[in-house]
Amino acid sequence: MTESQSPDTNELTRLRTLVADYEKKMTDAANLVTYVRHEINNPLAALLGQAQLLLREQDLSDKSRRRAETIEQQAKRIEEIVGQLRDIQTPPSALNRASE
């Protein structure tokens, strides 16, 4: 330890480094969540759209209609779950700066 650095200064530097590393990891995780949401939402929108188009058909058998309704319901469920990922998508550094 140099004379100009006290134990408190070294600890503060260490803590700042830990926070910066944590923010980097959280930013990387948030970027991954953004990517995953995008990659799931694209095929999900197509799946949901196709199920809804099927449900518009007048001559659809009852069995096929129930299957299309199940597909639509489950696609909407996935859509809700993926939507919840939005809450963890913003990295903490951005949140901290926004509250300053």
Image (cartoon, rainbow, N blue to C red):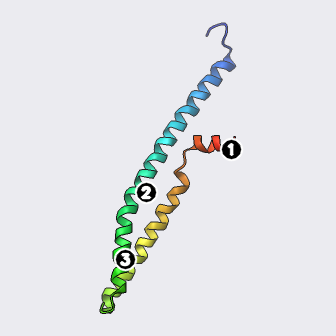
Given residues 59 and 64, the one toward you in this image is: 59
Res 52 quadrant in image: bottom left
Name the residue type under label 3.
Ile
Check disc 2: other Cα within 10 Å, few if <14, some if 14-19, many if 20+.
Answer: some
| Residue carrying label 3 | 71
Q: Residue at x 36, y 86 (%)?
A: 56
Query: Mark 1 falls on what kind of element?
Result: helix
Which mark, residue 23?
Answer: none
Name the residue type under label 1.
Ser
Is 7 positioned to the left or the right of 18 in the image?
right
The x, y position of residue 81, in whole percent, is 48, 64
Query: Mark 3 falls on what kind of element?
Result: helix
Distance from disc 3 to disc 2, alpha carbons, whole Å, reads 19 Å
| Residue carrying label 2 | 37
The x, y position of residue 50, in whole percent, is 33, 75
Res 70 quadrant in image: bottom left
Q: Residue at x 54, y 45 (%)?
A: 91
Check disc 3: other Cα within 10 Å, few if <14, some if 14-19, many if 20+.
Answer: some
| Residue carrying label 1 | 99
Q: Residue at x 58, y 33 (%)?
A: 19
